[in-house]
Image (tube, helix red, strand yellow):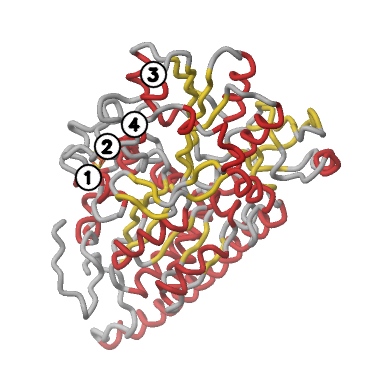
Amino acid sequence: MCLGVPGRIVEIADAEKKLGLVEIAGVRRLTNLACVAADADAVRASLGGWVLVHVGFAMSRIDEEEAQRTLGLLQEMGEVMELQEQLAAGDEARRGAGVAGGGLAAPPPMMGMPDGGE
Amino acid sequence: MKFVDEFRDPKLGKQLLQGIARLAAEIDRPLKLMEVCGGHTHAIFRFGLEALMPDNVDLVHGPGCPVCVLPVGRVDDAVAIAEHPNVVFATYGDAMRVPGSKKSLLGAKAEGCDIRTVYSPVDALAIAQAEPDKEVVFFGLGFETTTPSTALTVKQAAALGVTNFSVFSNHITIVPTLKALLDSAGENIDGFVGPGHVSMVIGLQPYEFVTRDYRKPIVVSGFEPLDVLQAIHMVLTQIAAGEAKVENQYTRVVREGGNPMALQALLEVFELRSYFEWRGLGTINHSGLQLREPYAAFDAEKRFAVPQLSVADPKACQCGEVLKGALKPWECKVFGTACTPETPIGSCMVSSEGACAAYYNYGRLSVLKSKPEAKAATRPAPRPSDEQPEAAE
Ligand code: SF4
């Protein structure tokens, strides 16, 4: 009952009563819009918008731009990490070359790898 | 599905997991992160995120599942109301199997009580309108996420002049709960994944005390796997930097100030009770909500005689320890043997958002048990000032 689902307002059923049809994964459900639209005009204007629905009530508008920003951030973070990995791989390769000539090199400082223990 | 599929991208998930592993290695001590909300517990198990955590990161599942914290006495009260002749007792399906001292609602239904599951409080109101000679009682359950819906339904009933509808309110509120948890088990917890849908109603400000008074990071999170992973990443980033801030990962849904319209409806209809009992956690002051005086006619507790007894949890039940994150579900002696989703002893086994049911249904126990930290982390993180050897191990 606590799991909210995103849906799109596809029809205004009764602007005065703040009721709309929200399509959730292909199913249309009569949904109360009183928490996302202050008056009848706001209800009419909400047509086409995305909302998060809980127990028959739209509880929040979903901000598409913010959704994109979050995904964008994740994407960027991924790219930075890939770059870091490439750099680290480069370091590793160089170190490997050094070690080959000089026997066992001391482990690089600060590289406390997770060893599974405490 | 839009706003769902994008947040399940495996490639981005893998990258986040690498970032989490790196931060965990950098912090290099056992960490316990608690997700307060049952919706997160559900997501974590559904997508198997727990098994993907680094060895020193332990996810503990908090008390944020309203069905799981429903005490035996309140279930008995619900059954007592449902047993009144002429009553239609309307409830969310999740609450049907929660054990009372003698029976659950499901048991009462089998004995002939008119108990119906509804998807929304307005469905209960519709039953009242369609069957005016019946008394319809709605079982009001949930945190601030569902309370505004109940409040608006009560207002609607008042406006329509419906007199055969009332609410048995077991609505609860998040802040006193978090506070009680931090006071009793806070030492064990390094940071929080904050409830997304409660926060879309109440906003971010109410969590300030977590960072100010307890110095724990809290990141409000969405419910898709990438949301949860990103929130964990954000919590770890704060820990690594020695910070404790309230942050919002779920910006597409949660606004800084919450939802003023929903809050207004909630505050108009409901007020705090002086205390409320929780399963396994005892009573927590100012944690429950009741209907305000102008809406007293819609208060089922005023309309029907309810026993209102406080009933002890069954002896075998260790739900309280599980809800506080002190015990892993499988460490409960009756887990999976006497206590299963079919025959639950404790309430954490009932709802799909409960930690025990999640472990039971989504299993992967062999993987989790083999994690060294899964056992070790039930001990508090080592601190110079700590002396107590914990009983749990
Ligand atoms: S296994 Fe059952 S009794 Fe034990 S903590 Fe979980 S729900 Fe409670």
Chain of the residue under the numbered disc 4 shown in the image = B
> What's the residue type where badge 3 is placed?
Glu
For mark 4, what is the residue? Answer: B307
Q: Residue at x 60, y 65 (%)?
A: A76
Residue B163 x, y percent position in the rendering: 61, 24
Q: Is residue B64 above or below residue A43?
A: below
User: Which numbered mark, 1 or 3, is in the foreground of this view?
Assistant: 3
Q: Earlier in the sequence, mark 3 or mark 4?
A: 3
User: Which numbered mark, 4 or 1, is in the foreground of this view?
Assistant: 4
Q: Earlier in the sequence, mark 1 or mark 2?
A: 1
Q: Residue at x 29, y 40 (%)?
A: B310
Secondary structure of the residue carrying tag 1 is loop
Chain of the residue under the numbered disc 1 shown in the image = B
Q: Residue at x 45, y 19 (%)?
A: B115
Chain of the residue under the numbered disc 3 shown in the image = B
**Mark 1–mark 3 distance (CA, rounded to whole Å):** 29 Å
**Mark 3–mark 2 distance (CA, rounded to whole Å):** 23 Å
Mark 1, ligand 1, within 8 Å: the answer is: yes
**Mark 3–mark 4 distance (CA, rounded to whole Å):** 12 Å
Check disc 1: other Cα within 10 Å, few if <14, some if 14-19, many if 20+: many
